[in-house]
Image (tube, rainbow, N blue to C red):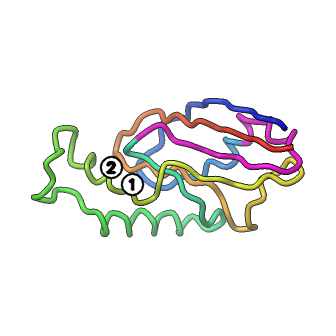
C-alpha cells in the first residue's frame, strides 16, 4: 500500500471558480505511482471551497459564480458576522454548501475523472489570498 501526502499553497485567485487540476498534478506527481487508489484534496480554509465540474467551457464557471451570488447574497440584515467585510459571511456559507474536500479515483497513475470534469478552487472572497491544500493519495 502506498500513502503519500503533501501540503501545497496556491497563488491568490480572484473571486470566482478556478480550475486547479493541472496545478495539483504538477505539484503532486506522486499520483503517477498509484495503479488503483484515491486522491483526496482538502482545503484548509473556511471562505473557499472545492468542487468538481465542467472543465472545458469557462462560461460554466462564470454561471457558478453568478448563481452562488444570487443564492447567497451579501449585505443581508440578519448577518451578525460582518467585521471581516461584506463578502465574508456569504463566503463561509458558500464554502459550507460546496464543501472542503473532493475525492477522485486514481487508475493507472491518472485521475479517473470524466472527460469534461476538473477540480475547481471556489474562491468566495474578493481578496482571499493564498490558499493551502492538503493532498493525500493512497492505493496500490
Q: Are the residues tagged 1 and 2 within 8 Å (C-beta)?
A: yes
Instruction: Determine whether, in the image, residue 30 is placed left or right of residue 18.
Output: right
- Above or below 64: residue 28: above
- Real-space Cα distance between discs 1 and 2? 6 Å
Residue 10, percent from left and from top: 55, 35
* Nearest to the observer: residue 1 or residue 106: 1
Residue drawn at 84 percent across, 38 percent down: 1
The kind of secondary structure element at disc 2 is: helix
Q: Which mark is residue 92?
A: 2
Highlighted range, magenta: 25-45
Q: Residues within 10 Å of mark 2 (few under 14, many from 20)?
A: some
Q: Residue furthest left?
A: 77
The kind of secondary structure element at disc 1 is: helix
Residue drawn at 61 percent across, 30 percent down: 7
Q: Which mark is residue 138?
A: none
In which quadrant of the rendered view does residue 118 lie?
bottom right
Residue 89, percent from left and from top: 25, 49
Residue 22, percent from left and from top: 70, 46
Residue drawn at 59 percent across, 35 percent down: 134
Q: Which mark is residue 96?
A: 1
Instruction: Determine whether, in the image, residue 32 is placed left or right of residue 61.
Output: right
- Above or below 66: residue 39: above
- Above or below 8: residue 90: below
Residue 40, percent from left and from top: 65, 46
Image quarter where the C terminus lies is: top right
Instruction: Determine whether, in the image, residue 63 is placed left or right of residue 42.
Output: left
**Was residue 26 drawn as part of the magenta stretch in this picture?**
yes
Amino acid at each position: 500500500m502506498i500513502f503519500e501526502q503533501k501540503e501545497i499553497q496556491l497563488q491568490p485567485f480572484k473571486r470566482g471558480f478556478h480550475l486547479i487540476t493541472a496545478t495539483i498534478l504538477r505539484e503532486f506527481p506522486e499520483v503517477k505511482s498509484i495503479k488503483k487508489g484515491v486522491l483526496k484534496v482538502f482545503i484548509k480554509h473556511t471562505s473557499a471551497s472545492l468542487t468538481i465540474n465542467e472543465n472545458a467551457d469557462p462560461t460554466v464557471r462564470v454561471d457558478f459564480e453568478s448563481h452562488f451570488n444570487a443564492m447567497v447574497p451579501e449585505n443581508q440584515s440578519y448577518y451578525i458576522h460582518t467585521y471581516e467585510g461584506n463578502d465574508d459571511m456569504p463566503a463561509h456559507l458558500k464554502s459550507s454548501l460546496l464543501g472542503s474536500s473532493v475525492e477522485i479515483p486514481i487508475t493507472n497513475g491518472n485521475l479517473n475523472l470524466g472527460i469534461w470534469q476538473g477540480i475547481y478552487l471556489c474562491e468566495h472572497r474578493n481578496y482571499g489570498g493564498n490558499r493551502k491544500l492538503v493532498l493525500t493519495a493512497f492505493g496500490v
